[in-house]
Structure formats: structure tokens, C-alpha cells
Image: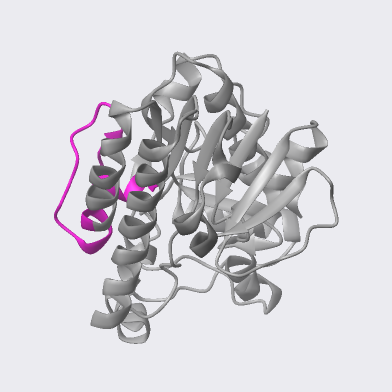
Amino acid sequence: MKIIIFGGSGFIGKHLTSYLIEKGNEVVLVSRSERQSQDSLVRYVTWSELQENIESLEEADAFVNLSGETINQYWTPKAKTRILESRINSTKKVAYFVQKLKSKPKVVINSSAVGIYGMSDSDEYDEDSPLSNNDFLARIVYEWERAADTIEQYTRLVKLRLGVVLGIDGGALPKMLLPYKLFVGGRFGSGKQWLSWIHIEDLVRLIEFCVTNEKINGPVNATAPSPVTNDEFGRAISSVMGKPHFFHVPSLILRVMLGEMSQMVLNGQKVIPKRAVGSGFTFTYPTIDLAIKDLL
């Protein structure tokens, strides 16, 4: 297959690229700057080059859009604008490319996030749950998916709602491990807030599954079937690393340190991958214990 990955230079994109080329697929990576590939199955093209000529996107089997500025930064008004615009603008560009192509991709996998369901310590969410627009993260994802919806008139669209992606070489996990390495690991706030997560290996397999399974369309929760609380997650790390889990970081301290971004740590949602499981996808790492043991 020929797969186009937008935003492929990040943590998820690197793993996805390696996985796809190992299976003999041709990968075209769309990035901001020119790069040279050491692999004959990987080509680079810049966003600016595509504005002039989209020929390199022809005959693609799938587009995977992972573009967007990281949310792991202090949420100043300017940062919030950049975070929102980076997602909407890149998605609109992908939609434009799809519209203009003579040979359209069979599917577009557009990244999204479980933040669209809002925050709750008690509710459980799947792809059929009502959407929220009540906080910054929910508003971002809501507008992000609205931008992606224009693609549906041209080809199959999968909105991949990502949970916390766990990998040892990127994402949130290395930062989460640091307190335990310093012997000050423990719960944040109440510790009851839900963490919906997925192992990076399962994520890239799920993306491939969505590409090849023509019956899948619309929202797909990219989360493991066993979400955990913040306290349970910390205890899993503690058990594998053999480090203590006793330190408590009060909510007030996190709010002072992180500002509005503290809601990412102090709030969460219990998300179930109903559509992936119902379509026959099998998780290699369905529980947090298995995932942490593998990664560490």
C-alpha cells in the first residue's frame, strides 16, 4: 500500500512509519522542512511543495493526518490559539488535497482525541456517547472533527480519538516515570480521575486495521479496553519499577504550577474502544500491567 502521513515526524508518526515499512508499504511523509530518507520505501515532501503540486499524493491507499501542535505546554491565550489553529488548518489542507486529487485515497484517518467527551470521574464513554463543548480540550476536538467532516463527501473518513499514548521514547510516559525514578511517585489530586490509555504498538496496529477494514468509518476510540484511575496507573508503575508510590501532589499545587493545563492531570474520562473491539480488533496490551511491563 501507499500511505501518506501528515505530521509523521512526531512520536506516533515515527512508530507508524517504522511499522508500515517493515511490512513493505510505501510511505510518503509530509513535513514542514525538506528531509532526506535513508529508506527506499520512505519519501519526504513538504507542505509548501504540495501547495504547488500534489502529484506525489496520487494513487495513495490512505492518508493519515497526525498534524497538530502539542498540548503539553502552558496554556496562554496565544498558545491556545496555536493549538487550535494548527489542528484545524492542517485538517482543512488535507481535505483540500483530497478534493483536488484525481485518484482519491480510499480512506483518511484523521487524528482526534477522547477529550471530545468532556471530563467525568463517574461516566463511561464510547463512540455513541454525547459530545461535550464545555472546556478547552473538548472545544478543540469538537472543532477539529468538524473540519474533518468535510472529507466524508469524497472518501471514507475515520476520526481516531486518541487517549494517552504510552511509549518509552516519547509521549507522556517518560515524564510520568520521572517522579518514581526520584522516589517521589504517587497520586495526583484525588487519584480517582480516569486515564484512558493505549500502548504505542497497539495504536499503530489499530491505524493499520482502520485502513484495511472498509466497514470502519466515523469515530473510533484509540484506547485500551481497560482504562485505569490515576492512582491505579501509578501503582502499576510502582510495581514494575520497584519504586514507592506514596507521595501525594495536592490539586491546588498543580493548578498553581500548570494553570488551566492542570485539567489534563486532575480530570479525565473513562473511554471504551467499543467500535474497535466490535470490529474484531485484538489488543496485544489490553491491561496497564501488561503495557507497563513491556515498555519498562
Q: Is residue 133 left or right of residue 214?
A: left
Q: Which residue is farthest bottom?
A: 256
Q: Is residue 120 shown in magenta?
A: yes
Residue 259, compared with residue 137, is above or below; it is below
Whether residue 168 appears in this view of the structure is yes
Q: Say which of 121 and 129 sits in front.
A: 129
Per the rendered image, the range of residues in magenta is 112-139
Q: Is residue 273 left or right of residue 117?
A: right
Residue 232, percent across and down?
Answer: 51, 50
Q: Quadrant of the N terminus?
A: top right
Q: Quadrant of residue 220?
A: top left
Q: Say which of 25 and 110 sits in front.
A: 25
Q: Quadrant of residue 158?
A: top left
Residue 127, percent across and down?
Answer: 31, 29
The residue under the point 60% across, 70% down is: 33
Q: Is residue 8 shown in magenta?
A: no
The residue under the point 26% across, 26% down is: 128
Residue 295, percent across and down?
Answer: 74, 51
The residue under the point 50% across, 35% down is: 226
Give the number of marks.
0
Q: Is residue 172 left or right of residue 255?
A: right
Q: Say which of 103 and 222 sits in front.
A: 103
Q: Say which of 144 and 203 sits in front.
A: 144
Whether residue 126 appears in this view of the structure is no
The residue under the point 31% across, 56% down is: 88
